[in-house]
Amino acid sequence: MEHNNAFMKLNSLFIALLLCLQSQAQVLQHVEPSNWWVGMEHHQVQVLLHGPEISKLKVEVAGLAIIEEVRTENPNYIFLTLETAQKVAGTYPIRLMDKKKVVASHDFTLLQRKPQSRYRNSFSSQDVIYLLMPDRFANGDKSNDNATGMKEQADLNAPGGRHGGDLKGVSDRLAYIKELGATTIWMTPFLEDNEPVYSYHGYAQSDLYKVDPRYGTNESFKSLVANAHQLGLKVIKDEVPNHWSSKHWMIQDLPTSTWVHQFDEFTRSSYRTTTQFDPYAAKSDKAASADGWFDTTMPDMNQNNPLLLTYLVQNTIWWIEYADLDGLRVDTYSYNDKDAIATWTKAIMNEYPNLNIVGEVWMHDQAQMSYWQKDSPIGALQGFNSHMPSVMDFTLHDAMMQGWKEKAQGWDQGMVRFYENFTQDYLYANPNNLLVFMENHDTQRFNESHPDLADYKLALSLIATTRGIPQVYYGSEIGMRGSKAVGDADIRRDFFKGTVSAERDVYQEAYYQFTKNLFTWRKDQKVIHEGSLLQFVPQNNVYVYFRFLSPEKSGGKEAEVIMVILNNSEKEEELIWSRFTEGLHGYEYGKDVFTNQTFDFEQPSGKIPAKTAYIIQLHH
């Protein structure tokens, strides 16, 4: 009997404790960020507390000073700014008090940073970036194809639906990416996107601190990055500060009326991002571009709200520190409020001075794109500095979509398009830090527009040997096609097969082997990573350029030189070697790095077959 009474007492205590915890969970529904790190440059941390009517409660924090406490017009929020400087790793409880009673608490933890975390290495022109979409790349765990609480269920038959790819699938294929010769992985967003349809792309994020459960968990992403690092691969996270999902819990319960840009009726962005720097632009036109919603399910965030801007800064820093990231790509960079996004970028760079960040600036003019790069001479004309280290070379992509199709060279057509693109590099503060690409997840598939393997070889040779950071899109290396005209789903086809040689047909294998050989060769080519560029005006649709390192940079007695010949003509063309004396640097001959074919520069000329690319190492 005494035994039963003791058991009943313990059971009652357990039930009371459980009810207490449930009650506290109802009072305090969100704490973001839930933790921070010691020794951070950003040491005054804004902690968001969210729960029903919590603004009526008093807040206490054990061991950390409250620098500022903001209670907004929404009684469900409290914003605390806590001082973490000179603190040690440990737990610092945050308590919500009703008079003297603790009604909710959160163990806010300060973690120890990894050594050299602040000065982490990042991606650069020595890398090759492999862009993939997690939902379409590989399904490593079919048990998470659907998840409790997620509105959209997996449906392989729906072109714009969830197809089941996940982080485990990516992790399982890291060796494939490394074998291909890529060195860096850029995944499109993988955080929770709980829109009821068309959620696979991830650009409408409904929780900025949580991996979508159909992809995995926060811990599985962290493990993926660690596994990539063990293989010598880097990982870039895709950031989306411009807009969130309409289903984000905070959009459903706005902290302030100014958290997002609101209108009497739905107002889409005009997409006229040139208004951001147009000296004559009407204020209404600027607002139509920067404040309009990107889409019906993507509310535009008001980054002029200081609470939101701090939230965005901290969220990005949190992920870099938590997952040990190697870099960032920022979606729709030029759609953000330009001064606010510059503040955001500078805050990230202050925390991580060596980090590389590339912004999506989808424009078709070099001066306009240059405006958004760090220390831009164009931006300086208006006293603007974005602090963004890199931007995407969309004008080169424009040339990619047109130049190879133009078999006859006109004044501004054919291979001249590429030449002219690089003549504008004087506009950039750092042209060697531009992202160069043939295609990405938003564009026409290159192999759809150019179904001939010869075109692929020409284009890939160009982005692999010119200045900048080359990026390849998943599936391109096996000849994957897809039409933008058909829809985005067609340019984002499933790649669940093709990473194993037995799964590739002869056509796919030819693409794969060329890609692998080219990128593998590129890995150790300092002359490509850091060398100067010398180009010659194309003639007869043949483009010739050189990459060279001075003796001081090459560590030798003479310059190291690579000669690239891209013949886009439909017939054999003859090159007079004396025209290229300046680039040949006195070398007598060269050998193609793949075929070992010899070119004798002491002869008057050489013949270049139609639709052929040569990458030639020069020798005495």
Image (cartoon, rainbow, N blue to C red):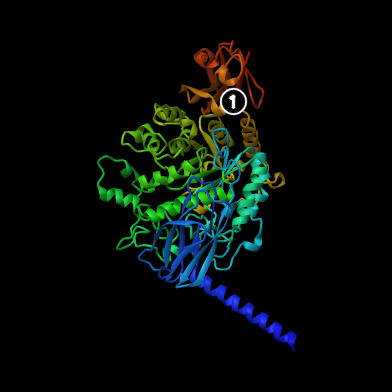
Q: Which residue is mark 1?
A: 615
Residue drawn at 49 percent across, 64 percent down = 30
Please, is residue 58 above or below residue 120 in the view?
below
Please, is residue 43 above or below residue 546 in the view?
below
Q: Does residue 462 appear anywhere in the picture? A: yes
Which element is circle 1 on? strand
Tell me if mark 1 has few (under 14), some (14-19) or many (20+) residues whose alpha carbon lies within 10 angstroms of its own: many
Residue drawn at 40 percent across, 46 percent down = 341
Kindly give the residue lying farthest to the bottom in the view shown.
1
| Residue 330 pos. (x, y %) | 47, 46
| Residue 364 pos. (x, y %) | 39, 38
Q: Does residue 571 appear anywhere in the picture? A: no
Which amino acid type is shown beneath numbered disc 1? Ile
In the rendered structure, the answer to whether residue 335 lies left or right of residue 593 reads left
Please, is residue 192 above or below residue 229 in the view?
below
| Residue 500 pos. (x, y %) | 70, 46
Foreground of the two, 43 or 444: 43
**Quarter location, residue 16:** bottom right
**Quarter location, residue 120:** top right
